[in-house]
Each structure stands twice: as structure tokens, then as C-alpha cells.
Image (tube, grey):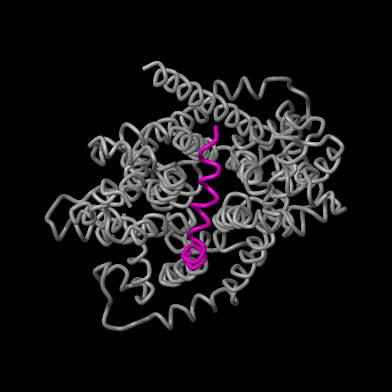
Amino acid sequence: MFKAQKQINKKSNLLTLVMLCCAAYFLLPLIWLFITTTKDTTGIYSSFGLWFTKVNHLVANVKEVFSLDDGLYLHWMVNTTIYAVVGATGAALIATAAGYGFSKYDFGLKKPLFAVVLGSVMIPMTALAIPTFLVFSKIHLVNTRWAIILPSLISPIGVYLMRVYSDTAVSQNLLEAARIDGLGELRIFFSISLRLLMPGFITVVLLSIVSIWNNYFLPLIMLNSPDLQPLTVGLSGWAQSSIAGGGGGDSSIQAAVITGSAISLIPLIIIFLILQRFWENGLSAGSNKE
Amino acid sequence: MAKRSRHGKAGLLFVAPFMVVFVLTLVVPLVYSGYLSFFRNRLVGGISFVGTKNYIQAFHDHAFWSGLERVVGFFFIQVPFMLAAALIFALVIDSGKLRFPKLIRILIFIPYAVPAVIAAIMWGYLYGPNFGLLAQISRYLHTPSIHFLNGWMTLPSIANIVTWEYVGYNMIIMYAALKSFSTDLYEAASMDGANGFQLAWHIKIPQLRPAIFLCLIFSVIGSFQLFTEPYQMTPLSPAVLNNSFTPNIYAYDEAFVSQNINYAATISFMLGFAVLIAASFVGLVSRQSRKRAVNV
């Protein structure tokens, strides 16, 4: 390493301290959330938010989360998992194939098709949700799992990322060599190219999982049956009824709402921590092109 | 890049699955709701073609425009703040001057894993008057307590939630771009005595333009379709967060509360156009600024 480079890399305690303070802003609300899972509903209002109360209610809260409304929470968890896993894997596969097709082949209408795909990134997904609902209610897909999975399969940004990624990850020479060996195009894709495209593929899976896991508007309008709903819609309903002033509300479930919220975050946080590097690898490809 | 046209058909095969779902879940809904926006369903007389009357109504609809103005205002207040924070964090982490850079990076990024619904529930408690964490802290410090979800404070409070959720995401996009730049220029510049700040300002930020542009476009789309946070917080601030607080809330209300499907389709379309106009405007401004940068 050059001397100059070393000088640049001298660590600064002050800068570290300032950045740790900034990081605290992002972390403290979550610390509050996880501490509050140990309190009952009166404890939420009467104790200091960032410290525990004398009695630990965590076990009682978790039990209540899974027993409220005949164990609906577990249904929501399973639903969210199904939507996220099926939707994200499907979206990533379809987007990878399409991005690869746009990158490695010449075909008629290629330019206009890609322009349309890229332009569709601009369509606000929630503005699209009502039109999609109108069509799905015509063909009786409303209030089925397909109403969530089908729209999740489209990831225009995924196609874009995978096209850029394919440009560098799969060389044209390699394809030519495989063709000379007599392999068909599909065979080449599944046995050679897909492996080379894996890091980009995982990035698209991650992006899709997050957007499906977080999606609220689409399932809110598509799904009437509580046992088809994902965690976001279910928890939102509990939360709104627990704080609704006046009639109908049940304020005693607030501790369960907070505990349920905290539990629902754990899988995604774990995925984030494990697959962190894929964000950077995949997104750096996309963010340098215009 | 050399491509052999005799394999062209295979290319279509790879693109086909995406295009099929694309048509089914994107093109068909758009066409169908575009069609619906030219009709009206009246109690007396049933469904009838009304031409552009729905659009004319929307043009004069105070509820639609007040929501649109609000999200535009939201964009101008929240997005510069969020992207500036993301840019500074990305540059500081990339500078190599931090201890525990990986830890700090993941801490800032983690809120992106929190669904908007959960973030809104959580911040609703933190904002709570008297009992909320922020009220507790201000009581401890003897500073006047702020009513976060009252009157004009509501919008900045929601902007804070959105900022909390998305700074890390934008930071990662910019940081990923920074990582991919060649360090030759940095070394040359630091040989010439440039300090970290000069390096960031003169070399890194100009190279980051495409990444910043990408973040800006995502932010336009995100701001204009604001829905989940204000909708979730409605019971906490019912007087402010009304049924036309944002265009999306208004469209939702028209479709599912007023049962006015045709007008909801019209509102969705108008919102889509607004996003297109705003995004093109951002594209235009960024192209202009790039030209200016090249000329200088």
C-alpha cells in the first residue's frame, strides 16, 4: 500500500463518535420496540421507554400474540413467508432470464421492449394496485393467494440489474464455446450462465423479498379473508383497533401488537445480516449506468 | 458486443416469461382502468360513457389537488434531507477513517428491513403525547413537549418516519457505487495533497451523479405514492389525516369507501401522470446540471 493511502486511512475517533450518534437514531426505535415486548399494556404507558419494568411479561405477550383471534398470527406469518418465498424466487428467475436475454441476444423489438420495461419502473406500484384490483375482480382472482403472487413476479428493476450484470458476468466467448460443444441455448443458461449470474440473482431475490414482505397496499385491497392476509395487513388491523378511541377498540391488546410487530421483524433482520454483501455487489452494477 | 442473429429467437424465449406476466399484471390493468375512467356508474341510469368528464372533475377537485400539493411539498422537504444524509454517510464510511465501519453501515441500513406498517405503529408510540419516549425525554430535559401528530407537525413527523426507513437504502446504493470506482484517482489526488473532504467533493461526488440520480427517481415515486404511514396513523390524528391526505389515500377512499370505481381509476391515472411529469423534470434538471459540470 502507498504511503499516501495509509495517511488517508488514518482512523478518526471524532468521526467515529459522530457516526455512532447518528447510528443511534436508527437503532433506538428498534431497541424501544424490543424492550417494550417485555411490558404489559399499562407498563407501556407508565414506565421509561428504554428500560425494563420489574415484572417481565415477554412470555405472556408471546402467548397472547399466538392465541389472539384463534391463532391468526401464525396464519399471517405462514402467508407472508409463502408470498415472499414464492414471489421473490419467481420474480428473480423471470427477471434473470429476461435480463440475460436482453444482454446476450439480438432479436426484433428488443430496443422498444427494453425501453417499455425500463419506463415501467416509473409507474407507482400503489397507483397500479387499484387498476390491478379492478382486473382481478373481473377474473375472480381477488381474495386468492394469486392476487398477491402474480403482481409480485414483475420486477422491472430486477430485469435492468440483471441485464447490466449479464453484460460483464457472462462472456460472449464462453457462450460461443458452449455452442460449439453442441449445447442448446436453454441448457447453456441453466447449466452455465445461471451459476455465473448467482450473485445478481440473490440481489434481486433480496430486493423482492423486502418489497413483498413490506407490501401493504396491495394485500389490503386484494384480500378480505383474514386467514389469507400477510403480517403487515393483520398487524395493522390489530393496531388500529387497539388505539381506536371510542367503541369497538380493545386497548388491552396493545402489548400483543408491539410483541407481534417485533417478532415479525426477526426473520428479515436475520436475512439482512447474513446476505449483507449481496446488496452492495448487486446494486453497484446498476448504479453506475445511466 | 458481438451477437449472432441466428440465436435471436432464443433471446425472445428468455424474455417471454417476463413479458407475459408484465402484460397480464401491468399492461392489461392499465388499459382496463384507462377504459373505466371514461365511464360513470350512476344510481339512476347505470353505467354510461362520459368522455373526459371524470378527468375534468378531477382537474377541479380540491381534494385531489390538496393531496397532490401535500406530496409535492413532502418531496421537497423530505427527499433533499434524506439524500444528503445518505450521501454524507456513504462518503464517511467510504473514506476509511471510521472505526467499526461495517457495524455502523448495517445499523443505518437495518430500518429498511422494517415494513412501513410496523415503522408507523412504532413511531406512533414514540410520538405519543405524555407517555411516548420522545415526550419522556423532553420532560426529563425540561424542554416543552412537542405534539408530533397535531396540526402542521403531522407531515414533518411522517417525513421523519420515511427518512428513518430509507436513509440506509439510499446510502447502500451510493456506497455500492463508491466501492466500484477505481482508486487510482484517489491515490493520485492524495499524492497531490488533497484531504479527505477535497477528495469527496472534487472526485467522488461528481462520479456519484448516476447513483444520486437513481436515488432521486426512486424518491419521486416513493413520495408521490405516500400511503401506508399516514393511513396507519389515522386513528392517532384523525382531524389531520383525512380521507384525501395524499392522492393514494383519496383513490383508496373513492374505490373502497365511496364505491366509486370509475373515479378511483381516474385519480390513479392522474397520479401516474403526475409521477411521470415529476420524474421527467428530475431527469431534465440532472441532465442540465451534468452539462454545466462538463462545461466548467
Residue A192 against residue B69 in the figure, above or below: below
How many dots with numbers? 0
The residue lying at 37 percent from left, 37 percent from top is: B185
In terms of image quadrants, where is residue B12? top right
Query: Looking at this view, is B193 or A105 the one in front?
Result: B193
Name the side, left or right, on which A242 lies relative to B97.
Answer: right
Q: Which residues are magenta?
A: A269-290
Q: Position of residue A84 (x, y in %)?
A: 63, 61
Q: Position of residue A229 (x, y in %)?
A: 63, 62
Q: Position of residue A221 (x, y in %)?
A: 64, 50
Name the side, left or right, on which A133 lies relative to A214.
Answer: right
| Quadrant for the C terminus of chain A in the image | top right
Q: Is residue B241 visible?
A: no
Q: Is residue B11 visible?
A: yes
Name the side, left or right, on which A174 lies relative to A262.
Answer: right
Tell which residue pokes out farthest to the front in this image.
A2
Name the side, left or right, on which B202 lies relative to B278.
Answer: left
The residue lying at 81 percent from left, 36 percent from top is: B4
Residue B195 against residue B94 in the figure, above or below: above
Residue B177 against residue B114 in the figure, above or below: above
In terms of image quadrants, where is residue A122? top right
| A280 inside magenta stretch | yes
Q: Position of residue B151 (x, y in %)?
A: 32, 40
